[in-house]
């Protein structure tokens, strides 16, 4: 399965935590306005490997914000929260 996401209107936006649950150093601003992300994945691999799929997919997006390095642990924690469990 091919998955593609396009993020537009990024230039000038600042990376923040919506609910302030994550400590992010302020001032990380995107200079690029758009990014296109894509991946190919076997559908049977999604559930058992979701963090391993999401991390490399979203890392380039987060890097637009002054080279922010998206940690695997942040991905694991957020996916766990979305699924109703904490790691």
Image: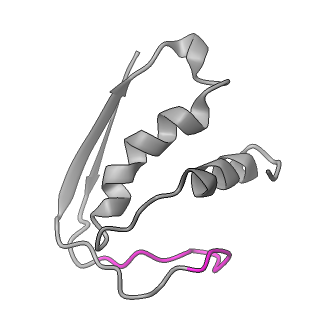
- Image coordinates of residue 5 in percent, x first then y, are 33, 40
Q: Is residue 69 above or below residue 2?
A: below
Along the line of sight, which residue is nearer the eye, 79 or 56? 56
Q: Is residue 17 magenta?
A: yes
- Image coordinates of residue 29 in percent, x first then y, are 29, 78
Q: Residue lying furthest bottom in this view?
A: 26
Q: Does residue 25 appear to the left or right of 14 in the view shown?
A: right
Q: Does residue 38 appear to the left or right of 16 in the view shown?
A: left
Q: Does residue 21 appear to the left or right of 4 in the view shown?
A: right
Q: Is residue 86 magenta?
A: no
Residue at coordinates 79% horizontally, 51% vertically from top-left? 87
**Residue 2 picture quarter:** top left
Q: Is residue 11 above or below residue 26?
A: above
Q: Does residue 9 appear to the left or right of 51 in the view shown?
A: left
- Image coordinates of residue 61 in percent, x first then y, are 33, 55
Q: Is residue 68 above or below residue 78?
A: below
- Image coordinates of residue 22 in percent, x first then y, are 62, 74
Residue at coordinates 38% horizontally, 51% vertically from top-left? 59
Q: Total of numbered circles in the picture?
A: 0
For the N terminus, the image quarter is top left
Q: Residue lying furthest right in this view?
A: 85
Residue at coordinates 28% horizontally, 74% vertically from top-left? 66
Along the line of sight, which residue is nearer the eye, 33 or 23? 23
Residue at coordinates 58% horizontally, 39% vertically from top-left? 51
**Residue 73 picture quarter:** bottom right
What's the coloring here?
Answer: one colour
Secondary structure mostly taken by the magenta-highlighted segment of the chain: loop
- Magenta region: 13-23
């Amino acid at each position: 399965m091919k998955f593609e996401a396009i993020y537009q209107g990024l230039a000038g936006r600042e990376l923040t935590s919506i609910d302030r649950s994550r400590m992010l150093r302020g001032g990380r601003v995107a200079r690029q306005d758009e990014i296109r992300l894509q991946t190919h994945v076997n559908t049977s691999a999604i559930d058992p490997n979701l963090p391993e799929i999401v991390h490399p997919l979203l890392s380039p997006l987060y890097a637009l914000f002054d080279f922010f390095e998206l940690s695997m642990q942040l991905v694991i924690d957020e996916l766990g929260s979305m699924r109703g469990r904490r790691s």
